[in-house]
Amino acid sequence: MDDRGSVWTLLIGLLAGGVVGAVVAFLLAPQSGAETREQIREKGAELGNRVAEVYARAETEAESALGDLRTTIDKLATQVDEMIAQGKARLQGDEQSLAPAYVPEEESAVRVSI
């Protein structure tokens, strides 16, 4: 979760920094209003393209991380299933090895008396 938060924090920081920088640059630039509006449109389009690129990259990385996570979960689930099967087999083996050794006293007394 920390990685996802840091990516969004970075994106928001980049976006806010870009907007603030662009506004300050345009307000202090010595040019006409028409030129400034044209530059604002161009810079806005550039910023939109950059945001789209960063978003696409983040989406690709998130999908990759999700795929890796699914693979890891599948491997762990398989290992747990194998461990459960081994435990069951071991318990069944213990039951079989203990069964002949256990004879209740009442049964042994009956056997002896016959």
Image (cartoon, helix red, strand yellow):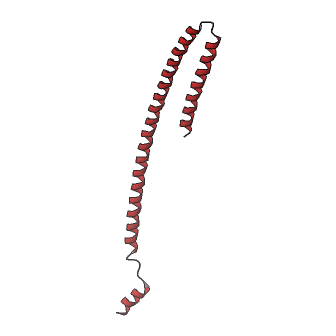
Q: Give the percent coordinates (x, y) of residue 33.
A: 59, 9
Query: Which residue is farthest left?
Result: 114
Residue that sits furthest to the bottom in the current view: 113
| Of residues 19 and 9, the one drawn nearer to the viewer in this rendering | 19
Q: Quadrant of residue 94?
A: bottom left
For image coordinates 43% across by 44% down, the residue present is 72
Number of labelled discs? 0
Pick the quarter of the image with the N terminus.
top right
Quarter of image, res 103: bottom left
Give whichever of 63, 14 is nearer the camera.
14
Image coords of residue 29 (percent x, y): 63, 9
Q: Is residue 91 left or right of residue 50?
A: left
Taking 90 as reference, is 57 above or below it? above
In the image, 96: left or right of 2?
Answer: left
Between 98 and 20, the residue placed more toward the observer is 20
Instruction: Kindly identify the residue that appears in the image at 50 percent across and 18 percent down.
Output: 45
Outermost top residue: 31
Point out residue 85 in the picture as x, y percentages from the top left corner: 38, 59
Relative to residue 71, is residue 93 depicted above or below? below
Front residue (pair 91, 35) = 35
Outermost residue toward the front in this view: 33
Q: Quadrant of the C terminus?
A: bottom left
Residue in view at x 47 percent, y 35 percent: 62
Instruction: Where is residue 54? Give x, y as percent.
Output: 49, 26
In terms of image quadrants, where is residue 25? top right
State whether residue 37 is above or below residue 97. Answer: above
- Asked if residue 36 is positioned above or below residue 2 in the image, the reply reads above
Which residue is depicted at the point 60% across and 25% down?
16
